[in-house]
Image (cartoon, rainbow, N blue to C red):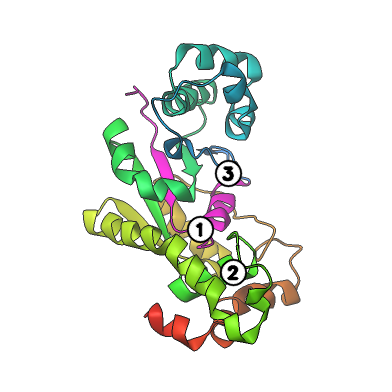
Amino acid sequence: MTSMDEPIVFILGAPRSGTSLLMRMLLVNQPLVGGTDAESQVYALKRKKAYLTQAALAHPYFKKLIRESDLRDLANSNNDFVQLFWSAVEFYLHQHTEKKVFMEKSPIHTLFWRQILKDYLEVQFILVERNPSATIHSMVTTRWIPIPFKGLGYNPVFKFLPYIFATLLSYEYFIEAERIKSFGNAAIVKYEEMVQKSPDDLRISFSKMLGVELSELYIERPFSPEASSRERKLHTDGIDGYKSNTPRSILWLHK
């Protein structure tokens, strides 16, 4: 679809698995890495559905990626958001020749990885993995999932219901993640390692993974110079903290 020479990397994984954490680590203070912290989610939109130029101009991803005047021209010459995405990426890289890797992070694209490969054969995937029970627990505690039975989740008798609902929502993500691993076209990053390894060890590992020399990793937590020991502990405690709060039946289900 495009003539881009720079690696295009999609960060995939279930919601609340650590994809945002990884994206921030690879974008902040990294002169060789391009992209934006917004999610495009373009493959989740209907490809053949006509859209207004105004809708494209209002999309937070494209607004952060390129200037409005350039975006307007691209929106007028492309038929859907997927085509607009690839045109915008190509335009961005031509405008920022210092960028050697382009990153995109939308967990929903985990469900569309086959179509992404059809559109751009040279695309690379990074799959973020986290303990399934921890992922589900995070979805429940952060109110990521819309809970139709509001209030029941606070009743000990019905505590498992939000976890069941979150499991059902994320099941397809877990299945597709296993298929991506079987396909063999993805680098695997463990959430637990991201918050336990030293920033320098991660920098070396990520540099090899992307094929570019990364600068010092800097994110708000847990690796920023301003992060207190308490913040660091809160972050690392999240690795196993789900075990004491998640219903045992749910823990058993995710084994």
Few, some or many C-alpha atoms within 10 Å of disc 2 (few <14, some 14-19, many ≥20)?
many
Where is residue 228? Give x, y as percent.
76, 71
Q: Residue at x 44, y 40 (%)?
A: 44
The percent position of residue 74, horizontal first and vertical second, equals 51, 15
Task: Please tell me which of labels 1 and 3 falls first in the chain.
Answer: 1
Q: Nearer the viewer, residue 149 or 15?
A: 149
* Residue 5 picture location, percent across and down: 36, 28
Q: Is residue 217 above or below residue 143?
A: above
Q: Amino acid at mark 3?
A: Gln
Task: Check disc 3 and report its element: helix, strand or loop.
Answer: loop
Q: Is residue 193 above or below residue 48?
A: below
Vertical order, 62 against 125 (above or below):
above
Q: Residues within 10 Å of mark 3 (few under 14, many from 20)?
A: some
The residue stretch that appears in magenta: 1-28
Are there few (<14), some (14-19), or many (20+) residues within 10 Å of tag 1? many
Q: Amino acid at mark 1?
A: Pro
Compare marks 2 and 1 and give the one earlier in the sequence.
1
- Left or right: residue 172 versus residue 77 is left
Q: How many marks?
A: 3
Q: Which residue is mark 2?
A: 140
Query: Nearer the viewer's eye, disc 2 or disc 1?
Result: 2
Q: Is 68 on the left or on the right of 12, as rendered?
A: right
Q: Which residue is mark 1?
A: 15
